[in-house]
Image: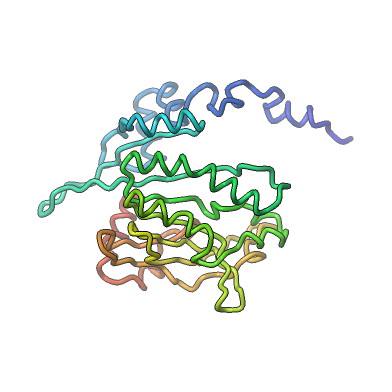
Amino acid sequence: MDKTEEEIAAQNGNLEESSSTKDGSICGYESLHHLLSVNLKPHLYKEVSRLLIGLNCGKPLELIALPEAAKALSSKHDFDLQAFSFDADKELLREPQVVRVGLIQNSVALPTTAPLLDQKKAIFQKLKPIIDSAGASGVNILCLQEAWMMPFAFCTREKRWCEFAEPVDGESTRFLQEYARKYNMVIISPILERDVNHGETLWNTAIIIGNHGNIIGKHRKNHIPRVGDFNESTYYMEGKYRSSCVQDGLWKDCCQYMLWEAPSNELVSIWPEWCRDCFQSFCNCW
């Protein structure tokens, strides 16, 4: 006998949607970090934090006070804004440097039944105040989520979503170039790329926009997960280690790879010598 939706919901423990879920909190807490810190004993919380965020040089994660302008944008446009400080081992021959990295996780702005062009424009509008808040916070490198300019539809096998694909220098890049120049920040923009020079092949590509608004590199996703019926190769081709190792102006000595591409000796073997130390440092933190 088929179960009703109510029976399934009750079995899964979500028969009634709480008000905290509706307001975006987690059981009334502003973040998972806050929930864990309040409800776990200090020694357990320390170990859980180590597993979630790494050793942080043996120090607790510190909150950063954000500028009032950034907090005002967060309040006005209803998005969550948090900042944390991660430590690095002290070097003997160089003074410490502070690099501010911003990460944006966004949802779609319109129903996926809306016209595709309207959906993309709505996402642009949604991100404007979020990017402005990153600029107001002095972010040096801003990272957007995978395929940020469209619904993440790669599990549907519906080919119509390929219409969101665009060239490296397309609409999404031009939109972000203005902000890179305005705030003197590097922006990592992962998009569904349409390679117009090679038969309109589609790639899952992260574009690196320099702090002067110039395109200084790109990386095409190498590893495509295939789990059951989830197969991203329905949409785009696998990259061929076209990793970006950037040596450009202020933002040199940076390497890039994408989600699912965990560090490996095979990947790092193609990187130049100057960035392999960065890979080793990352592995130590990981």
Give the left or right position of residue 211, taking residue 24 as reference. Answer: left
- Find the residue positioned furthest to the bottom: 198
Give 9 or 201, whichever is nearer the viewer: 201
Residue in the picture at 40% in, 67% down: 217
Give 43 or 215, whichever is nearer the viewer: 215
- Find the residue positioned furthest to the left: 93
Q: How many labels does the image show?
A: 0
The quadrant where residue 108 appears: top right
234 above or below 85?
below
Where residue 28 appears, as percent x and y from the top left, is 52, 21
Give the left or right position of residue 33, taking residue 200 as reference. Answer: left
The quadrant where residue 273 appears: bottom left
Residue in the picture at 54% in, 51% down: 148
Where residue 105 appears, as percent x and y from the top left, is 50, 44
Where residue 49 appears, as percent x and y from the top left, is 38, 35
Residue in the picture at 57% in, 46% down: 123
Q: Quadrant of the N terminus?
A: top right
Give 22 or 116, whichever is nearer the viewer: 116
273 above or below 56?
below
209 above or below 125?
below
